[in-house]
Amino acid sequence: MSAERRYTPTHEWIQPFGDPSRMRVGITDFAQKEITDVVFVELPKPGKQVPQGAEAAIIESVKAAFSIYAPMGGEIVAVNNAIEGNPALVNRDPYGEGWLFEIKIDSSPEWNGLLDEKGYEALLASGTGGGH
Amino acid sequence: MADFIPHTDTETREMLARIGVGHLDDLLSVYSQSISAEGLSDLDSLGSGCDERTLLSWFGSKAELNRDAGKAVVFRGAGAYDHFIPAAVGALIGRGEFLTSYTPYQPEASQGLLQAIFEFQTAISRLFGMEISNASLYDGATALAEAVLVAIRETDRRVVLLSEGLDPEVRSVVQTYLEGLSVRVDIIPLTEGFTDLPRLFERIDTTVACFVGVTPTFFGTVDRFDGLADKLHSSGALLIIHANPHSLALLKSPGEWGADLATGEGQPLGLPLASGGPYLGLMTARKKYVRRIPGRLAGLTKDSEGRSCFVLTLQAREQHIRREKANSNICSNETLLALSSLCYLSLLGPSGLREAAAGSWSNAHYLRDALISLPGVTQLFPDTEFFHEFILTFPVNANKVSEHLLERGVLGGLPLEALMGPDWSRRMLWCATECRTKEEMDEAVEQVRDILRILS
Amino acid sequence: MSFHEEFLNNDATGTTRPQMEPTLWQKSRPGARGVCPPGEDPGRFEDRMPSELRRTLPLGLPELSELDVVRHFTRLSQLNRGVDTHFYPLGSCTMKYNPKVMDRIPEIPGFRDLHPRMDENGMQGLLSVLHECEEALKTLLGMDAITLAPAAGAHGELTGILMARRYFESRNENNRTEILIPDSAHGTNPASAAMGGFTVHVLPSGADGGVDLDRLEKALSNRTALVMMTVPSTLGIFEKELSRMVSLVKSAGALLYMDGANFNAFMGILRPGDLGFDIVHINTHKTLATPHGGGGPGAGPVGVKAALAPFLPAPRIEKKGERFSLVSPKSSIGPIRSFIGSAMVLLRALGYIRMLGGKGARRVALYALLNANYLRTLLDGVLPRTGDGLCAHEFVLSAKELVPDGLHASDLAKEILDAGYYAPTISFPLIVPEALMVEPTETESKATLDRFAEDFRRIVDLAKKNPERLKGAPRLTPVARPDEVSAARDPVLTDPGSFVSHS
């Protein structure tokens, strides 16, 4: 599988990481700007099973809390502990150091239902994305 | 009639004209068809209003029917204590800038209150030996219930162990809070007034969310929790200690016992008996639980010009932001009373607080010695250390003793039958704070002697 | 620099802002004594109490003289705004003037110094007064029974929700696990529902800010336990089709709950019981003469219809002849707090009702409507408002049009502070972007409202002409805008200086 990144209408991204059934998840640059300064991320416990679309993490700004949904179903196998001490990473580098968690996915067909880069850009341009 | 409406008739007319309606009642069209034309019928039963003097004299006449501390010397505690309160407390919390302000959501216009809350959090954290405290909850019982909810959320487990040393009414409050949440509550019995730790250790497994220990217990005894925190932590459970904050001036603090969360009733710290409320819920925790605990938190930060200042923080935990996912529904709390207790603690200081607590301990022991010298009176758990409360067994019905004492100007110990069951019909929970004088105690003992003579 | 050194350096910025006050621990002087309580040296205690039960950790409390403490808190009070010092148009909070005579009631020794576990014989005065408070609230709310126990509005909500749970259990309708709540509701409503073990179903508001009846009808089912409504809504709007809504809910077999936080808008005019509500809570610290105290205490009495009365929290006040007693019926949900209730707050509520009388109570609500509508009229056209025509006791404006200039409702609020007021509520209700919620209350004079309207208009003009100016507000308060991001990222919740203890 290529290192291609896919997106959800709720502004998460997902990308294979190492082995093809292991996926890394974060929020998009658009989302981090909307959220403004991230002050805390409540990460899932490794080992937790999350179906596609279920709430997997919560990102807090000063005045709001945002649910982060699992783009694909599976088991949480890793979380980014670095953002616990330094939540600003999510703002600074949402696609890199600011990743949130990794999922061992159940079903690869879910991948095909996600937006590719063009599709996500079109969604942003139309302004119809499902807000966080 | 007084209604505190400042408008003159002319002003009212001008305002109505500006709005474009002819009469005050025309404004009621916002309620459209929901209003009956004739108005509410039984409003007259609320009377036609009165002036200040009439009002206060009416309340005064009702108050006369109560046997307050001025009419009956208080030897009763059981969750509400007659401690000394410096006059300055009332003068300071009565300042209108505090009294008539709202929750400090606009920090620039609320620095005084925010700093006071920050100082309250500091004083209460230090007193409990814990790292953090919130800005208050309703009372000790609801604070404990909220702490149990924190443990349930943190561990995702559904078994809660409560010490038998908890006030039975506080235990019921915890159970009411857990009513809708499918949680099992088990009571861990006391032996001789303290927790049987080996038996408790056997009961701890990976289904347990937390154990709630209490000190001093409802029975007045000082409990001990050696090795308990480690044992609980090794199976992923939390230690919660519910403590009387006044006793912590001298007794080992929840932090020293290794508690994860500690709660208490703040009434002994500068609040009057007040017929039962409002009181002050205290909640403290280890810092790692800072995003789990309910209630407001004031934090230190800098303003945009680099000046140190205070602000409500971690609000994203709270109901106004997280709604059904919030970690509690609490909004209004007991800020003004938190301010009372902060004034109290800073007026007494560390030496004053220790002296008041030592006075309570000392008076209670003097009183115990005198009462058990009466014929037929024995102490329950005589070999267990107690702080300022103790249980005595009388040769006669305790309700009767209490009734006679009250007639003689003494509010004696609490008869325990109503709370504990018929086996406890001859038992009373006595208390003496630092406020009791030797004369008051000697007099009360003589009254008990006389009453026992009459009743037996 | 340590925190303390930095804090003391606060005035190095050289502005004209009022000076901040050092913390208690910064002012602490080792060995200083304040008030001497009765008591004794702890020496004897230390001799007799086993060392493993004694505290070894320093107490960490500050050491100050009585005057040090009095000056400290007096200074802090001067850095704070209350209704006594400033107009406080904080929407949904009903920040009205509360008569000072009510402050005297909790000072009456017969109430202040009464032990809550007094024998019933010794608390007949208290019980009779609380009973009368229940009766007065029954009259004002049109309900069959009242509990005075809840310590606040949100606590009342939880109480009502737990009672509804018991009610449906008693009817073997355990399938009713959902609570429907409009999206404009106070956050406490969904939070209380979740604490009570219910699932929350959010009802989106219609275009006029009211409940969308079609959506309500679709959402109702045999799973619905409760529909929680705020009346008038947090937008200051009264549901136009309330009676149809009530019958929809009733025919679905669900109960109807009124969040009566906005009681000041309809006291003596409408009664929740007459409107068809089964459960209602009110906030006595909003309408009934308890000042907010910087966040509390308050009280949140709950009224219910007869079918729910068996489930009211324990203890209940019972009247037999002329004698009052406390009873705990088996069917009760149990106690929800210690002792009888926040008696000192409830006494004030009763005192206020007695002083107003029935007609006075009604006048309070009428003038709350008058002041809100007058101010609304003065502000017509300044910023768009949600809803049209008359409002109830408050109204919501939106500062959305300032967003392209980089301004938010909060920027207006900060400039309003500089004009010498507290600010309206901002960012609530959540369904209005850049909301400013204004509730003047009945106790403010026409002159105050005129002056506020003029200043508000000037500030919005200024925002449009010179947005940068507002970004620097407030300039006259003791501090400028706090850095809330770093406060939340790395919370400092206790004074670092408190660890240096001298005791």
Image (cartoon, rainbow, N blue to C red):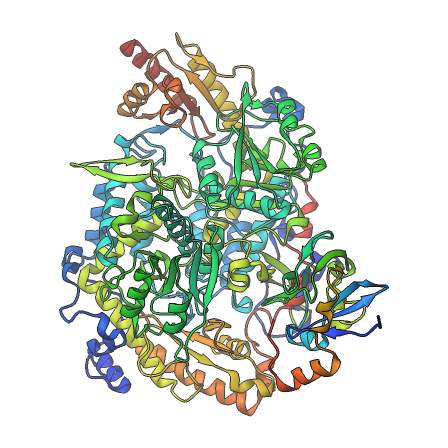
Does C280 sit above or below residue C18? above
**Identity of the residue drawn at 29% across and 46% down:** C309
Which of the pair B172/B107 is nearer the observer?
B172
In the displayed structure image, the side of residue B146 where residue C121 appears, left or right: left
Q: Position of residue C383 (x, y in %)?
A: 45, 86
Does B269 sit above or below residue C427? above
Q: Position of residue B164 (x, y in %)?
A: 51, 28
**Would residue A27 be seen by someone viewing this image from the given angle?**
yes
**Would residue B7 be seen by someone viewing this image from the given angle?**
no
Q: Position of residue C137 (x, y in %)?
A: 25, 54
**Identity of the residue drawn at 73% across and 68% down:** A109
Q: Quadrant of the N terminus of chain B?
A: bottom left
In the displayed structure image, the side of residue C464 where residue C55 appears, left or right: right
Q: Position of residue B271 (x, y in %)?
A: 44, 42
Which of the pair A37/C75 is nearer the observer?
A37
Residue A27 picture quarter: bottom right
Does B305 sit above or below residue C82? below
In the displayed structure image, the side of residue C337 where residue C62 appears, left or right: right
